[in-house]
Image (tube, coloured by chain):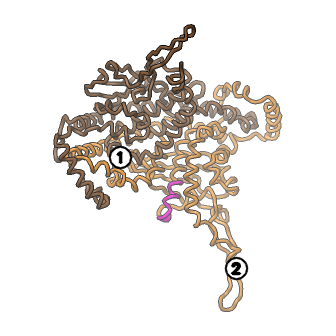
Chain colours: A orange, B brown
Amino acid sequence: MHKRLILSLITKKKNSLFHYSFNTPNFQLLPKIVKRRVYALKRLQLQSANIEAKFYEEVHELERKYAGLYQPIFDKRRDIVAGAIEPTDEECEWQSDREEEELAEDLQKKAALEEKQADSAGADDPKGVPEFWLTIFKRVDMLAEMLQEHDEPILKHLQDITVKFSEPGQPMSFTLEFHFEQNSHFSNTVLTKVYKMKSEPDAEDPFSFEGPEIIDCEGCKIDWQKGKDVTVRIVKKKQKHKGRGTVRTVTKEVPQDSFFNFFSPVKGKRKCDLDLTLATDFEIGHFFRERVIPRAVLYFTGEALEDDESYNSKLLCVIQDLDEEGEEEDEGEFDPTVSI
Amino acid sequence: MHKRLILSLITKKKNSLFHYSFNTPNFQLLPKIVKRRVYALKRLQLQSANIEAKFYEEVHELERKYAGLYQPIFDKRRDIVAGAIEPTDEECEWQSDREEEELAEDLQKKAALEEKQADSAGADDPKGVPEFWLTIFKRVDMLAEMLQEHDEPILKHLQDITVKFSEPGQPMSFTLEFHFEQNSHFSNTVLTKVYKMKSEPDAEDPFSFEGPEIIDCEGCKIDWQKGKDVTVRIVKKKQKHKGRGTVRTVTKEVPQDSFFNFFSPVKGKRKCDLDLTLATDFEIGHFFRERVIPRAVLYFTGEALEDDESYNSKLLCVIQDLDEEGEEEDEGEFDPTVSI
């Protein structure tokens, strides 16, 4: 399901451009009476599109229902990761024999040694699975690209990522929730990002409908502790007084790369011409929802990475394309060495 | 939904190869107590996979339900295409103003002229929408690649393509049905192709599960009229008698390219080493089910082609890859000029 949506996001832009130039030539050469029948077929196709929209609404309902079924499993995952519960021996049984077999023998020895070291070093008894989510961020290319060194200490406090679906009867949406333990960086315990969806055929272009699409998103305000906001950095700027020729130094906050830019700007603040960046944002939100949240442990161990290889490489192409087009708005004018 | 499945088919092969080599190194370095917890998380992940399988079963049920809702529309389409019913004026209303606008003016004039000619030429009153399905075959690259000149007269008799889903409680499958009017080529009125699906996690590799997959397919026997089978051609072969040195000419049926090879071989006859060709076959079956059947008129007019561009180009890459690997089994030994 997720891959369908992604592709529909990618192909959507082009459709509208070519929609009319494509269909006409041959069609116009048909006898009038046949053309008339084809119009009747197109009207039938509209009916199909409306039925399809209802189908996707029912699928969304199913997803809500299943979210409830997954929840106890995700809750348990969270508790094990956080160290709130210790799984029983039975719950930890895993026929790792085969995995061990595949390990080259010398690697095995090395591992045994380092494991011993790790065990004694970690004699202070690690709590739960340390850096579970941070490790996932580092391992998944799409997330690693957003991750900056200054984000890492903060993400060590990330305890869970969950998804909430819109209630029935409400406009379709889903909300990613990033749950943090108390930390010295910000006072929020949950950071949220809402993705709004549209699941009916567009009146202007009904035939391009292929199921729900993300159409908008909204971050949240992060209540940074004083001086802890990693999405900005302080630069010193020298200003020359035009008349007197004296120079003074002023400090200024300028944006800097950070995963936490994912939560800004909040609604309405986004520039209208950033459609392409929005598309990237949608991909990432969708990736959290459909891949990272449902199978986090497989990203932690690396098992899910190969599954996603073709998926990621396609996305990365798109993201790179988008980056190139938007590049001119980065940095540059804020560089303190340039100004005087 | 369809694109998800396609991608899962494409990526599947690789997964099993890398599954174990990928996940171990870092993981092995974790302290034993943490590793133990991660095994617990993996067991939880297995539970998720089983719930996911149930989700997809319910989606399949929904698809069955909606197939029933689409059916009256598809029936009407079939009747209009075949000329069995003439749509009312109201049913043919279409605001084609915008489409006309976009037509360059000279193209419009040309079209008007040719339309007139077509109308008078077609004074014999074309029935329904002539060559509706054949036109679709010609316009869609993936189908056009299978289409041979000798297939075209036969496909003019194709009146409908439908899909049937397996009954609840039965193993998951879908059947493509190609409905033909009476013709001089074969006596079947329906040619069928069944695609069998698997919708539970593989015991060997449960984490690779991403929803139903096509696992097998089965064509049908075509009862060709004598001498009309387009999937073979008669070649003359000269044979030299080893002892006497005399030469005689024998005739032999050899396979030739045709869309109708899509229906063969019937179950069990396919060679085991043709996995890759099977993958191509699965893509095509899936494409009929998810794209061509639900939105046939848009392929007829060309409107759906642009939507599929990125989809097709990806598929074609795969198909080409597969073709190259399988090439050596084509032709060659059957070439009559080589043998003596």
Q: The disc numbered 2 marks a residue on which chain?
A: A
Q: Note whether residue A183 is visible.
A: no
Q: Is residue B132 left or right of residue B200?
A: left
- For the stretch drawn in magenta, the main secondary structure is helix
Q: Secondary structure at mark 2?
A: strand
Residue that protrudes farthest toward the bottom in the picture: A243
Any mark on residue B302, and which? 1
Residue extent of the magenta highlight: A269-280
> Dividing the image into 4 quarters, which one contains the N terminus of chain B?
top left
Name the residue: 57% across, 51% down: A317
Q: Amino acid at mark 2?
A: Lys
Checking the image for residue B282, the label placed there is none
Please identify the quadrant where the C terminus of chain B is shown.
top right
Mark 2 or mark 1: which is in front? 1
What number is the disc on residue A238? Answer: 2
- Left or right position of B293 against A159: left
Instruction: Answer few, some or many: residues within 10 Å of disc 1's Cα (few below 14, many 20 plus, some between 14 and 19).
Output: many
Residue appearing at x 67%, y 65% in the figure: A227
Q: Quadrant of residue B14?
A: top right
Q: CA distance from mark 2 to mark 1?
A: 61 Å
> Label 1's element?
loop
Q: Residue at x 47, y 29 (%)?
A: B214
Q: Chain of mark 1?
A: B
